[in-house]
Image (cartoon, helix red, strand yellow):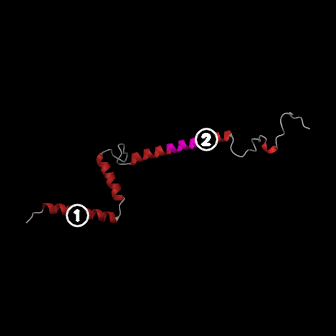
């Protein structure tokens, strides 16, 4: 017989405390490393979003700190008009022209002398 404590029964090998190298899963240090890595990725994403927001604010002609040339309101209007004109196709121009023509026709009809 082996020299065991007579009060404790023999424990089967599959129920014994496993060797840490045999355990499937992560160790505490690996979990800490994963959490630190996720926290670092989170900070990088926050910084990237902040940088995108700052870039968007500086390039938007509607913002107070618009950095697209001169700081006058005329340049803001020109930038807005340029973006509107550059982003339209021929159908958009035709619809705007028809709408303007209809409004001018109604306005002139209002001031026309009645017989």
* Position above or below: 37 against 108: above
- At a point 30% along the width and 50% down the height, the residue shown is 77
Label 2 secondary element? helix
Q: Which residue is mark 1?
A: 102
| Real-space CA distance between mark 1 and mark 2, rounded to the nearest whole angstrom | 64 Å
Q: Classify mark 2: residues with Cα within 10 Å, few (<14), some (14-19) or many (20+).
A: few
Residue 112 occupies which quadrant of the picture? bottom left
Q: Quadrant of the N terminus?
A: top right
Q: Quadrant of the C terminus?
A: bottom left
User: Does residue 93 belong to the magenta stretch?
Assistant: no
28 lies left or right of 40: right
- At a point 24% along the width and 61% down the height, the residue shown is 100
- Magenta region, residue range: 34-47
Q: Classify mark 1: residues with Cα within 10 Å, few (<14), some (14-19) or many (20+).
A: few
38 lies left or right of 75: right
Q: Which residue is mark 2?
A: 35
- On the image, the x and y values in percent for residue 84 come to 34, 56
- At a point 35% along the width and 61% down the height, the residue shown is 88
């Amino acid at each position: 017989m082996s020299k065991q404590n007579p009060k404790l029964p023999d424990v089967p090998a599959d129920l014994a405390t496993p060797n840490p190298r045999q355990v499937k899963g992560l160790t505490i240090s690996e979990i800490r490393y994963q959490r630190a890595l996720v926290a670092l990725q989170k900070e990088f994403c926050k910084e990237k979003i902040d940088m995108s927001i700052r870039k968007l604010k500086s390039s938007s002609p509607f913002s107070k700190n618009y950095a697209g040339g001169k700081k006058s309101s005329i340049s803001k209007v020109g930038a807005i008009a340029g973006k509107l004109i550059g982003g339209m196709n021929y159908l958009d121009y035709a619809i705007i022209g028809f709408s303007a023509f209809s409004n001018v026709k109604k306005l002139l009809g209002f001031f026309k002398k009645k017989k």
